[in-house]
Image (cartoon, grey):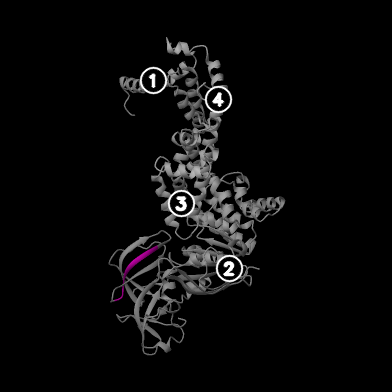
Amino acid sequence: MGDVSLKDIYKKFGKTQVIHGITCEIPDGEFIVILGPSGCGKSTVLRMVAGLEVITQGEIAIDGAVVNRLEPADRDIAMVFQNYALYPHMTVYNNMAYGLKIRRMPKAEIEKRVRNAAKILELTDFLDRKPRQLSGGQRQRVAMGRCIVREPKVFLFDEPLSNLDAKLRVQMRLEIRKLHEDLKITSIYVTHDQVEAMTLGDRLVVMNEGVVEQIGTPLEVYDRPSTVFVAGFIGSPSMNFMPARLDADGRRVKLPGGENFQLPDEGLSAYKGQDVTLGIRPEHLIVTEKGAGLVDLKVDMIEALGADTLVHGYLGTDRTVVTVRVPGVMKVVAADILPLTCEPERLHLFDPQSGTRLGGG
Amino acid sequence: MVENRPWLTFLTHAVLIVGMLIIAFPIYVTFVASTLTLDEITTSFPLLPGSHLVENYVKALTMGTTEVGATVGTMMLNSLIMALGITFGKIAISLIAAYAIVYFRFRFRLFFFWLIFITLMLPVEVRILPTYKVAADLKLLDSYPGLIFPLIASATATFLFRQFFMTVPDELCEAVRIDGGGPIRFFFDILLPMSRTSIAALFVILFIYGWNQYLWPLLITTDESYYTVLIGIKRMLDVGEGQAEWHIIMASTMLAMIPPVLVVIFMQKQFVRGMTETEK
């Protein structure tokens, strides 16, 4: 079984500490995506699991056995690199068979496994080609084939789709997902692309500056981001943030200009009267009839994307810059006033100092 | 060229042809002389090939001149052994040295790299006395190791391989580690095949370098059976008051030119590829 457990992992490069204590349990067969901006340490975590980087402190266990001191080859993992790292002088067949040959597997078994992997990945016709005679998508598949034939406990993906064009990326994303459904091998997938993360992952690990900000299913992370960073990082365009204050009984949240939103259920009485950061996603601000809006938006700029329209403007009397996503095409021009409303469940409140989420609302 | 003026085309071709004739003429004279008898050379010297081609070459290969004890055949073999020894030795050592410098982290790594680099400033001619002393003390005079070893280290080749290795993505090395291979496997299975074109290019350069070595073999060989062909030709001319056997000397010169020419002809394609492209 391929469950992976990270216990309080730290990593230092010389004197700079890049990973500040990461703990995460990955059950067998799960597809987990590590998501974060570049330089947040996500690749380092993956490379520590792979055994390509030494673990400064903490414990990584695969299938219950601590692997801190094992060579990558002895950890029963396989990895897809961002640039695929195919051996340029070997044919596709040999690229896939190389790892098995080193392990002294019988020829017949190698042949069987490679043919099988080639069939799954639709590479059968290309087995005699060299990597440079293949397209980007095919190279990507060969890199995955090299992992499949090994039948490892864990697959590691290091931004495998970032070298492909947008259309191919969507296609490969689906193929990776399908492959995982078929093989059910534990996978750790590193990316900075939130669409990949949302669509591929059973669970996401959102990282920032060497710290895990949140671990949860894609929808949990989207619906209940646990920090301002996660709220701003997930979702495109990103969430609108504005300073606000809870009223005396904690049931309504007030913008500095006086406009206010009702909180769901019983509100947040524990934080009544406090300053908060209010977050609302662009797609959750709804344009309503004149007079029915809770707050007015003064339109500044419009981006029509076809499927929907992004309206940028200033909110309320204190003129906070916000973006609203309106489905379909909307005919508005700069300086128009749009009345907006928002469902109470769609409001996110964060502590302005620590950036952590307040309550359930 | 966009321009298409007939007289310009004519001019460029004329310059090329004249230049080629100037370069080719001495070689042609050498060839002609190697087909004549000694009498014909010293008296009339016709500019058309004579009828003693086979005779002269066979004599050079099997007997040599009376002044030098070794036949040109032996000397060619010596030259070949030395040139190949230097070529393969240089390539092997440079590959290994570059591998160490690029892929392993050890103390004083940069220091050693610069040390190798600095030896570029110390060709054989500069260090000839100490090198001779060392070779003599090691009893390497008049031996193939003595001809080869002092010329076998190459900073240029090490540097060239280092530059090439640095363009090889690190992920390849990591992929091998994950596939279960160690440093030796990575070197032989991945790095060496990838350096194929660079090795071929270096082979051409180094073979010609080795074949054309003159000063060092001159110094270290006194036994005629270890003479290289270049030394041999020089010795054939040292006849003092006597008559140099020009027909044999010219035949030997032609023979000495053949191996480098063959190497260039047969490895030209790889040579150009190694100089211009890197397989990735």
Q: Could you say which is closer to the camera, residue A246 or residue B194?
A: B194
Q: CA distance from mark 2 to mark 4?
A: 64 Å
Residue B153 appears in the rendering: no
Same chain, marks 1 and 3?
yes
**Which disc is residue A231 wearing?**
none
Residue wearing tag 1? B21
Amino acid type shown at disc 1: Leu
Q: Quadrant of residue A7?
A: bottom right
Residue most toward the top? B44
Q: CA distance from mark 1 to mark 3?
A: 44 Å
Question: Principal SS element in the magenta part?
Answer: strand
Q: Of the two numbered discs 1 and 4 on the same chain, state the one appearing first in sequence.
A: 1
The numbered mark 1 sits on a residue in which chain?
B
Residue wearing tag 2? A69
Amino acid type shown at disc 2: Arg
Residue wearing tag 3? B166
Q: Is residue B10 above or below residue A99?
A: above
Q: Could you say which is closer to the camera, residue B90 or residue A355?
A: B90
Q: Could you say which is closer to the camera, residue A313 or residue B23?
A: B23
State the residue at coordinates (43%, 45%).
B130
Q: Is residue A163 above or below residue A31?
A: above
* Residue A183, percent from left and from top: 64, 61
Contact between marks 2 and 3 (CB within 8 A): the answer is no
Q: CA distance from mark 1 to mark 4?
A: 32 Å
Amino acid type shown at disc 3: Met
**Which disc is residue B71 wearing?**
4
Q: Of the two numbered discs 4 and 3 on the same chain, state the one appearing first in sequence.
A: 4
Residue A50 appears in the rendering: yes
Regarding mark 2 in the picture, which secondary structure is present there? Answer: loop
Q: State which region is magenta.
A: A309-316
In the displayed structure image, the side of residue A280 where residue A184 appears, left or right: right
